[in-house]
Image: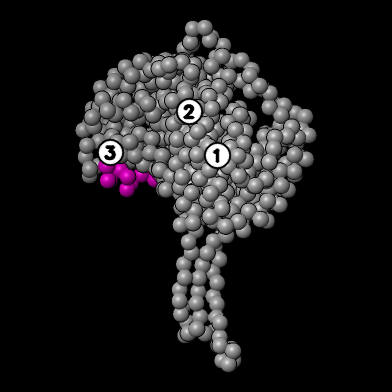
Amino acid sequence: GEETNGVGERTQPVFNPATGEQTGELRLADAADLETAVANARKAAETWGDISLAKRTAVLFKFRELVAAHVDDLAALVTAEHGKVLSDAKGEIGRGLEVIEFACGIPQLLKGAYSDQASTGIDVFSYRQPVGVVAGITPFNFPVMVPLWMAPVAVATGNTFILKPSERDPSASMLLARLWTEAGLPEGVFQVLHGGKETVDGLLRHPDVDAVSFVGSTPIAKYVHETATAHGKRVQALGGAKNHAIILPDADLDNAADHLSAAAFGSAGERCMAISVAVAVGDVADALVGKVAERAEAVKVAEGTDPGAEMGPVITAASKERMKNIVTSAADAGADLIVDGREFTVPGKEDGFWFGPTVIDNVGTDMDAYTEEIFGPVLGVVRVETVEEAIELINSNPYGNGTAIFTSSGSNARKFHRGVHVGMIGVNVPIPVPVAYHSFGGWKSSLFGDKHIYGEEGVSFYTRGKVVTQRWPEPTHASGATYNFPSN
């Protein structure tokens, strides 16, 4: 219900990636802080799950209005600590608002089923109840949207929620907490707990945490799933990606190049749904590479608050150095560096974590530029001869988060979306993030657990089903029990 410094004494600096300057210091929770947060959540769970759907919905509607009224404030915090441009920051908040709006329909979403007279004098009905205390562990790249993928649905279904945001851009989560409180959410239902690996491990192992939602890299997603599952928790852990877009010769190349550029370089490529591999089919490759290169060189890279800025810096100096090494390795291995962003900088902000849009042609599938999730503004081009070869390429990749096809052929599009082993697919849509009333999630090493996030699968994840078989015999006919299994 209020901000507290806690008792943990460890701190971590927070930077503005556009300038490289430290802008704050984050206090990290220790074991005692975690125990306090979980105890508060457990206590609140005893009553919040019994609050009427009407009252829960009223809080969600108010929260939705407050988030909408604070879009500019939230976006400013995101841009200051993540570095993405203001328009992109506002876009992620908009997608988060969609999930809040979906959660406002929770009375409809939690309707159960009823079977009258399933057997003589016996009725059967089913309904869903909250799992209890939920932990949400979220990444740096969407400090508003991803928490809003989780918390509104968890809270609407009657759970309490502990958010462990990224330490790199923590401020937006604090504003969200204040807005939940202003919306009338009772104490302990939504809490923010800042911390590092120790805090994550504490949440994964704590006996009073019932479920864990995670979005991050594949190695950590796998660790989260294995650890939390071993401690008896329900887990959805969304991992990394290597998203391909295939471009067929019959595609509108200008349209494809426009969208490839936006999908590869928007948000500095720091999206789990970014297109990082363009698969050029047949003789389309040379023309496609030329058009994408033109657009890459025209991207306006600047501090996120600059008018007209289309791309900002990457999140840390370490991320920049890692990207630089991967691109250099590809060039050394024989790939063609068409647009080189390794030494890009913004005048007057040379200490910022800048990396310009980069296009690499003739990328081999054994190169780090193909096998690694670069998570930066780097687009690799792989050349194949047929759509079948492109589908085989995608299916042989360990990731299965998102993919896209650019074509004017309905038959090829159908062959593609039926044939690829990927969870989210775009047809002439480069970043196919589902709307709030569907669910977000990949296949293979992009998802650990069996439930996707938000949408109806999110409602299912944050609830447990009950089935009641009931009989109300007349007092004068209360006998008639049998040792046989009743069937009618």
- Which element is circle 1 on? helix
Q: Nearer the viewer, mark 2 or mark 3?
A: 2
Magenta residues (range): 413-422
Q: Earlier in the sequence, mark 2 or mark 3?
A: 2
On the image, numbered disc 1 is attached to which residue? Answer: 147
Report whether 193 appears left or right of 389: right
On the image, numbered disc 3 is attached to which residue? Answer: 387
On the image, numbered disc 2 is attached to which residue? Answer: 89
Look at 32% across and 17% down and name the residue there. Answer: 294
Look at 22% across and 44% down and name the residue there. Answer: 411
How crowded pointer 2 is (Cα within 10 Å; few <14, some 14-19, many 20+) is rated as many
Q: Position of residue 109 (x, y in %)?
A: 47, 56
Q: Earlier in the sequence, mark 2 or mark 1?
A: 2
User: In which image quadrant can residue 91 be found?
Assistant: top left
Closer to us: 9 or 181: 181
Q: Position of residue 287 (x, y in %)?
A: 25, 22
CA gap, disc 1 to disc 3? 37 Å
